[in-house]
Every structure is written in C-alpha cells, then in structure tokens.
Amino acid sequence: MTVSSLRPPLVNRYALWAIGALGAITLSLHQAGLFQQELVNPGGWSQCWQFIRASVHPDLSWELLHLTLAATLKTLAYAVCGTCFSLCIGLLGGILCSEVWWLSVFPPRSQPRSTSFWLVARALLALPRAIHELLWGLIFINLWGLDPLTAVLAIAIPFGAITAKVFAELLDETPRQPLQILLNSGVAPLTAFAYSLIPQAFLDLVSYSFYRFECSIRSAAVLGIIGAGGLGYEIFLSLQSLRYEQLWTFFYALVALNGAVDFASAWSRQRLGCVSRLDLNVKKGRRSQPESPDRGNKGATKPSKAASVETATQERNKNRSLTAKNAAIAAQTPLFLILGLLLVLLISFCFWYVNADFSKLWLAVTWQRLAEMLQACFPPDWQNTSQLGALAGDTIAMSVLAIALAALGGMLLSFPAAHNFFLPGGLLNPGQSKGESAVYPWLLLLLSRAVLLVCRAIPAPIWALVVLFVLFPGILPGAIALGLHNLGILGRLKAEVLENLSFQPLEALRAQGTPNALVFLYGVMPMTLPRFLAYSLYRWEVCMRETVIVGFVGAGGLGRVLTEQLSSFDYRGVIVTLLVFLLLTFGVDWLSGTVRRSLR
C-alpha cells in the first residue's frame, strides 16, 4: 500500500462544506451591500461617543437604583417561572418525541407504526420551536395585555419545545440495555424509563436545564422591548430617550445578573459532575448493544493472558474511580439538600413576585379573542410574495453573516478565556511564571471572559439599536448585533470545550520537543474544530430565529415587514410572513443537522 493511497482525497465532504460556507458568506456580504452602497452614517458618531462616554459615569441616584433592583427582580422572576414550565413541557415532550419511547410502547413487529407516531410527535413541537419568544409575546399581548402571564408563557412555550427536542436526543443516545431488560420483564414503558434511561441521562438533562435557564434570563430581557417590564423594558426606554447614564446603569445590572447566574450555574454543575452546558457532536456509542462472542468465527483469536490482566486492571481502576465518585457525591448530599431547599424557595418567591393570573388561560374571553385572531388570519394575503422572497434572502444573509462573526470571534476569545491554556502551568505556558509575566495571563483571562459576558448579556435588539448609531438600517446592523450577542454565547461554550480537553496527546507532542505553535496547529485544532463547528451550526439555527427580533428595531429582513403588519393588525399578511419564516427556519434546521452529522 503506497503513501498516496493512504492520503485522503482533496475533494471530500469537508472540503465541499468549507467551499459552500465561503460561498454563502461572500454572497451574504454582497446581499448586505458591502460592495455597492454607503453603509456608515457619519452623523451618528457624536451620539456614539456620548454613549461610550456615559459608561464611566452611570446614574447612581437612589431612585434609579431602586428602580433597577425592581426591574432586575422582575427579569429574574420571569426567567425562573418560564424555565420551570419549559422544563415540565420539555421532560414530557422529550419522552414522547424520543424514538426509543415509541419503540418501547409498540412491539418490534410494529416498527412502521412507532416511526409514524415518532414523526408526528416531532412535527407537533416543530412549530412552537420555530416561532421566537418575542412573537409569542406579541400574540399573548393581544389575548391578555401586559399581564405577567404574557412573559411567562412567551418563554415557556418555545423553550419547552426546544428543551423537548434536546431531551429526546439525549434519551435516544442513552444506553438501552437496562431499558430492554425491564421491558422484557414485563415492566410498563413509563416505569422502565423512570428507572433506566432517565437516571442514566440525569446529569446531561440537568446540565442542559442550567443552560436553558441562562437563555431564559436573556429572553426575559428581550421581552421587555414589547412592554413586559424588567431590565429590557427600562433599557429600551432609556435608549429611546437618549438617557445614556441611566442606560448604563441598567446595562451593568443586566451584566451582573447574567454573571451571577453564570457563576451559580457553573458552580452547581461542577458539584454535580456535569462537565459542560451543552454536549454536541460527540460519538458516544451509547446505542450499540454489547457484542456476544462468536464461537463459530474461525478468525477470532483468544485474548492473551497479558491482555486479560490489563483488562482486569482497567476494570478495577474504573470501579475504584466510580466508588470514589459515589463517595464524593454522598459526602455532598447535605449540600445538595440545602441547594434543593434554596431552589424551592427561589421558585416559590418568583411565582409570588410575578403574581401572574393563570386563571385567564381557561376564561371564555381568552378563547373568544383567540378565535377572532384566527378568523382574521384567513384567507391569507398572497399578494406580496415577491417582496417576501427578497426579504427572505435578506434574512438568510443576515443569519449567515451573524454566525460567521460569532463563530470566528467566539473561537478567538475562547482560548484566552479557558483557564488551561495561557495561565501559568497551562498547555501553551507550561512554566511557573513569576512577577508581571504571571499577571498578564490572568488579566487576559479576566478581560476575555468579561467581553464574552457583556456580549451575551446584552440582548441582540439592544445591540442593534447601538449599532444603528453609526450604520444605516439594513442587513449589516442586524448581522453585527446578532453576531456580537452570539459571540458571547459561543465563546463561553467553546472555552468549556477547551477546558474539558484530554491533554495526554498534547503532552505527548510537547514531550517530543514540538513547538507550541505546532502543538496548537496539529494537536489542539483537530481535537476541537469538530466541536466548534457543531456549536456554531447549532447557534446558526438560533440566529435564524433571532433575525425577527432585530428586524423589530429596524435592522431589516422579514422582521421589519412583520413589525409593520402587526402594528397595522394585518393578520392576513402576518400568517403568510410567518409561513415563509417557518420554512426558512426548518430549512436551516435541516441543513445544520445534516452538516453536524456529517462532521461526526
């Protein structure tokens, strides 16, 4: 066998996906008018400078601080209540949307029927998942006005559908041998799930629940733009009235709230043993059944005595580590009980503080208004389909540019934000530095994490309003706003990937005298790039949904025309615009999933 036969072909699926991505970015830049028209507004630089200068002297008056505290509590309460409902929806929907559930309910010979039920369950949750929480909020405002119930359900419904999808994927990837044993023993499917799959996937479910709560904080701030209250509402009012000192006070409060939730989430996950918020693109081999020995296979060889001894040693070490881990968890049981009690108290306080009137859900007037809204949507108005087609192209271009900015910026900031790379004793700084050389890596770590925190804490519509100081309305301001917001999220997720890397292969390279640059190029990047791309593709789906909210503040795309239709109560046009947007969302979802699977 020659060396050329071992070399991978130049034209493979990875190269084709890379060429397609570069082509999409180039076309999106052309669609944004980067090479054709003037984009910068020179008259906005003075306001931009006033905005930046106000950051060093925010308004710290007692009245405004009291208002800030109340808005912060309202934002937190909305997020807690919405997350509680979304997790309940997600757990139930995750079971019903998992393939393994329907395979457990129906006998093996009824596989076509189980597949049909599985596809129907996934399709029912696709619609609420595709509609952004801001649109849900606008729908509920027409039903209940600015009641707190509007904000809670606007978070709960789409996030519940998203959580159900992720929970279903986690359950489908969990080992099924214990489930099969219980089902073959005559145990009911739901009981078998509760005693086999769910305990195995518990840490992954809890880890994603923490991540979903962090997302709820940001969504609760976004809902303030439509008048739901909280920090987002106060920020929007201050920005519209050009009160930049007050604006920065609310900014700092929002960043502090996100930072506190981020720290509490990371600390809790570390105590529970959850390594990351979101686990994507990992070949876990969970669904494979254990192979039985094939005695009739003449090519099978009996393992050597040395191999048997090594296997036994590995099993003993594994059992010891599991025993130590279980002992550590048992030692922390009182701490977990205290945390559980505090969590119950927090949830109870938030529901009391929100004081939402849940009785409105079954009032006759609610269903009457809903019926009137549905009647006003039909027949759909198909006259402006050509305009919607052009705006759909703008929306796709906005999402592509946003995820390109977020993916590249998040990757660059993730390395200094990880604690095991540039700090003394890290991979790229193996020596124990002293003096100023030890201070600079810590400053770089804190600065990069602060940048990521600020980027993800400030909602994308607020970023869009800030960017519109110096740019004319269009695709580019929306792409930059979405890119900055998702940069903070992707940077933190990618930093966790780096912090959870196995350093044994990298240490082996460095022990052979390999320079740090080559260790990074030939060791770190091949190990992390597939995960980085998976996270970026996952956030691309979210960027497509979020193009609507930046369109609400004048950033272009389908969100702009949707705002005009909703403000004029043109529900016949709204239903067509939503249909186009849903088709785009499902298309991006399918393409993203296809690329992620091909990269595994």
Image: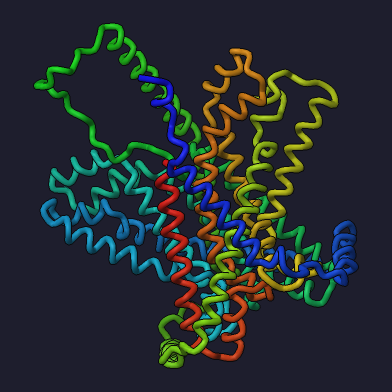
Q: How many marks?
A: 0
List x then y, in percent, for residue 75. 64, 65
- Check the picture and name the quadrant holding the N terminus: top left
- Check the picture and name the quadrant holding the C terminus: top left
Q: Is residue 440 visible?
A: yes
Q: Quadrant of residue 116?
A: bottom left
Q: Is residue 587 left or right of residue 310?
A: right
* Residue 201 to residue 52: above or below: above
Q: Is residue 403 left or right of residue 179?
A: right
List x then y, in percent, for residue 461. 67, 68
* Residue 195 to residue 363: above or below: above
* Residue 190 to residue 331: above or below: below
Seen from the viewer's position, the closer of residues 340 and 478 is: 478
Seen from the viewer's position, the closer of residues 301 and 322 is: 301
List x then y, in percent, for residue 459. 66, 63
List x then y, in percent, for residue 425. 68, 22
Residue drawn 73% across and 37% down?
A: 445
Residue drawn 32% across and 38% down?
A: 286
Q: Is residue 308 left or right of residue 395?
A: left
Residue drawn 54% across and 39% down?
A: 529
Residue drawn 32% across and 15% down?
A: 311
Q: Quadrant of residue 219?
A: bottom right
Q: How is the image coloured?
A: rainbow
Residue, far top: 305
